[in-house]
Image (tube, rainbow, N blue to C red):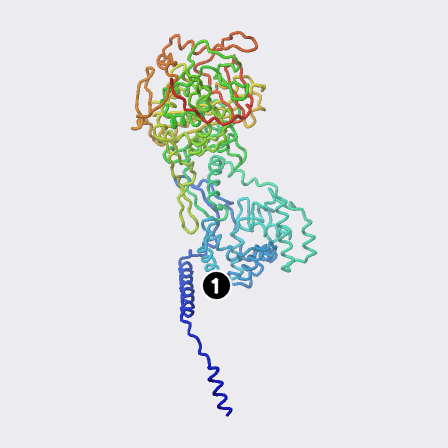
Amino acid sequence: MPDQNLSRANRTHPKKKRANHPLKKRILFIVASVIGIIAIIVIALVSYWSITAPKVTNAGLAGSSQSTILDKDGNTVWTSGNERREIARQSEYTDTMKNAVVAIEDRRFYKHGGIDIRRIVGAAFANLTGSSLGLQGGSTLTQQLIKQTAFSSATSDQTLKRKVQEAWMSIKVEKQYSKAQILTLYMNKVYMGNGVYGMKTAAKFYYDKDMEDLTIPQTALIAGLPQSPSGYDPYTNPKGAKYRRDQVLNAMAEYGTISKNEAQTYKNTPIDDGLVSSHPENDEEAEKEKISDSYVTSVLAQVKKAKYDVNRDGLTIKTNLDGDVQNKAYDIINSSNGNSYGINFPDDEIQTAVTITDPQSGDVIAQIGGRNQDSLQGLNLATSTQRSGGSTVKPLIDYAPAIEEFNWPTYRAVDDSSSFKYAGTDLNVGDAGMTNNLPYSKQSGQQYVTMRNALSRSLNVPALHTLEGQSTLPNGKKDEYVGYTRAGDFLKKLGINQKLTGGSAIGFNISTEQEAAAFSAFANGGTYYKPSYVKSITTREGKVTDMSSKGTRAMKESTAFMINNMLQSVFTAKAPWNLGYDKYIHSDYKQAAKSGTVAYPSDSKFPSNSAQDLWFTGFTKSAAISVWTGYDQPMQVDTPLSSTSQLPSEIYDTLMQYVMDKNDGDGSNWRVPSSVTKVTKYGQTEYEVKDADFKDPFAHRVFGSTTAVSGSSSSSIARSSTIFSTTKESSSTQQQSQNSTNSTTTSTSNTTPSTSSSATSSSTSQTPTPTPEPSGTDSKND
């Protein structure tokens, strides 16, 4: 019966069969397969990266991390660090020094096999929590040695591939070398600041001692330097140096090298205790380095921007430097009066900056960043944008954008009928020889001039009207003008980011580097090349990176040619449209240029014919040269520069002759592009944009241009060099004499509009009230 009941129970509650889930099995199979495939790929990739890792040799491990800068011909120009690096034997490093390094850099150094998983996890945790436990970071001493031997610190090299290779190579090195050998190799290789590599050399440099003679605090400072040699430099950052030294002392106490009480006592030692105060042995080498110092400074800036570290990466940097041109430029700029070049520097304090580029590539072939410099890698005046370019900016900000936007021909009439009044102010600006007092009226001469003549004579008023407007048409409307937006956009295409204000039309802050690059676009048909100092960078592992500048279209070919042609008139124009630069004409090459002068404020102690800054920037097909001259503190000099000085043009001419002769430069004239039409206007050759519409509403008001350009001594020319103005104060007419051949450009900085006049006229410099940005008009010609 029980069996029967059981049977019934079984029949009532039959045993459930296990469900078969083919979908679940399939999913598990797919997941396992994917994981397996990923694992295979990862293993294969890691294996491949490991096999293709750079080879580490004993010579490489023991070698220097110094970088070398070469000129275009492969000659060494500069090396990072002290070439007297001393290689120490294992026995020369004291136990105290070894323990200090291990304590602060890799406390588990003697326990891991090249990589330290515990340390990596600890560093990651510390980074997440902000704990000081991650002070040492995730890399072991062995990994740091590999980094300094085989890899660069460039951001482009911070990849998973490199991390895998670094770990693999560290494990291999640990198997091939003892811990003592690895530690010695590391201590001999690390960069210690101030051009010093290796801790033995550092002991001599900082304390003039052998390592065995260092005190505990001195040992701690040496051991702590590799993490940030400049940040912990005891000369330039004693506070940071003490902070790091005390960190090392604390680490030594925790490691057991010294007691905590001893550490506290050593922390009270002054950071400059025993520190060597001077290094005269470096002076002779420094004198040689001065020749190319500014160029090297620019090279280092470009390399740093590319995220390389010249002190750690062991780079070979091939540059575009022409050593012969650099030496010649240095000799010219640093010569004194009575020099063989015939260039008269007023005194030893006058400063000069020069940048020379190849217009066809953007390569900077030479650069001088100052005159009579007494230090290395200081302020590079050639790349500094702290001074106004004066009238050299007129083709960049005024006339090139006008041609680009409005198709103005080279003979387009521009307004020079009266002084220019800044909108919203009582400040008026005129041309050289004008007074700035209202009412102003020319009793004779040319009230409207061609764009070519306005540029070659460097007239201020037409430039201001071209950028900001205010020229009134016969119908009462305003003539078209560029405006700040168009001008700013145009400048950006030339690598110049400039906030434009009242007065920018006749001067804004700029560098010789920027001007040489921008004017190069006029020389090569409208392509802008960012100035390039570095041709290529080769890392220790042999990876070569091309650093050449890639050109971008900055303007139409027609714009570049027409500005180029007008700038040639700076040399070739006849009176009254020239400024005396015809003496620099050479039969073996064609050139174009622009001068610039920045006047002193009218309320300064200096005469009205004085200048704060003088510029000259010009080019041939083969070279663009920009020259600035002035004083570091122009308001504090006893005798200022004369506005009629041709110092920068003399430097330019001497350098251009040398460059063209030395490099057998292309001195041929520029061809007329197919987008430009050659015409005859006012008796001379001019150019128009082919088949383009343009407005020339003041053309009928241009008179005397034919005779003026031809150089005739007609009465119209004689009158145009004499300006009459009526002042408010006297209400009388005063004749102002303007020298038509020696008077130079007047201009302003980008914040203070100012004008320079002839010796018999006034000069005004005031800051106008900010005005709304001119938008430009598109008035029709009546």
Residue 272 lies, in percent from the top left, at 64, 45
Which is nearer the eye, 679 or 44?
679
Query: Which residue shows up at 40% across the image and 49% down it?
Result: 543
Residue 736 lies, in percent from the top left, at 49, 10
Residue 468 lies, in percent from the top left, at 47, 23
Which is nearer the eye, 600 or 501?
501
Query: Which residue shows up at 31% across the image and 18% down it?
Result: 680
Above or below: residue 157 compared with residue 410 = below
Whether residue 57 is visible to the viewer of this picture, yes or no, is yes
Above or below: residue 572 compared with residue 523 = above
Above or below: residue 561 compared with residue 15 = above
Q: Name the element at disc 1.
A: helix
Whether residue 651 is visible to the viewer of this picture, yes or no, is no
Number of marks in the rendered image: 1
The kind of residue on which mark 1 rests is Lys
Residue 385 lies, in percent from the top left, at 50, 31
Apparent side of residue 670 relative to residue 365 in the rendered image (left or right): left
Residue to which mark 1 is pinned? 175
Above or below: residue 141 compared with residue 727 = below
Which is nearer the eye, 481 or 613?
481
The C terminus lies in which quarter of the figure?
A: top left
Crowding around mark 1 (Cα neighbors within 10 Å: few <14, some 14 to 19, many 20+) is few
Image quadrant where residue 658 sits: top left
